[in-house]
Image (cartoon, rainbow, N blue to C red):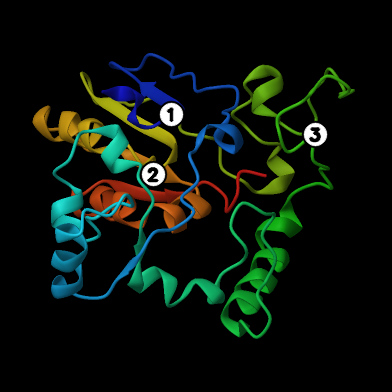
Amino acid sequence: MLGAVATITLALSVGTVEVLGHRGCGGHEVMRRNPGGPVINNAAELRSLQSRRLVQRQVTDEASAAQSTDPSTECTAYSYEPVTSIKSSFPTIWETATLVSGDTEAASLFATINSTVNSKVPNIKPKGTSTGDFSNVGYNATDPDCWWTWRQCTTPESSTGINADHTTVPEPDTWGLGFDDGPNCSHNAFYDYLRDQGQKATMFYIGSNVMDWPLQAQRGLEDGHEICIHTWSHQ
């Protein structure tokens, strides 16, 4: 069930055929929120909740959560104690991320990014809205910003010092699989399919989805997929 990750980007190359990616995704719209269910701290509490047949999701351990392929079960809200205990250390989910007060490690990393990567990039302003509306965007047809969505630019201006994108896979008969906007709550059939086909992929997770569905994120990691960040809230 490839619909398990709602917006899918498939980068496929055979030999040296050019790979074209997507022009944008709807991760800000597609994910189902997890308002949280009962917090499970140990196996005894889990068994107790299961015996009382609570409406909220009963399974909040990784091994059991990975077995169900029923979307209504997988997408029933739950809370996972290892995440709830650290939630205050992260930005508010599904809002534009800001540095959390007192997080010196993040502040130091942000300063490093500004002094290195960002210093090489021209003063490029965001285009369109955070929900993907480009209807009122005016843009120079020469594409000075190497904006992929405009004309699939893959080679930034040399003055930026940024390497060109990888758009081909030189090894014949090689697949490159990338999936955006996960983890989705109804993930198991999708991961099962990749496992059964002997495939590994790059999963571009949205941070807020990881906070909402931590066990689903853990499944992708445990299955050996490459995990990358796809922003905190898709804004």
Which corner quadrant holds the C terminus?
top right
User: Upstream in the sequence, badge 3 or badge 2?
Assistant: 3
Secondary structure state at the residue bearing disc 3: loop
Q: In this view, does 172 lie to the left or right of 96?
A: left
Q: Distance between the residues labelled 3 and 2?
A: 26 Å
Residue drawn at 25 percent across, 59 percent down = 60
Residue drawn at 61 percent across, 43 percent down = 234
**On residue 127, which mark appears?**
3
Q: Quadrant of residue 193?
A: top left
Q: How crowded is mark 2: few (under 14 residues within 10 Å), some or many (20 or more)?
A: many
Residue marked by disc 2: 183
**On residue 6, which mark appears?**
1
Q: Distance between the residues labelled 3 and 1?
A: 24 Å
Amino acid at the residue labelled 1: Ala
Amino acid at the residue labelled 3: Lys
Q: Which residue lies furthest to the front in this view?
A: 52
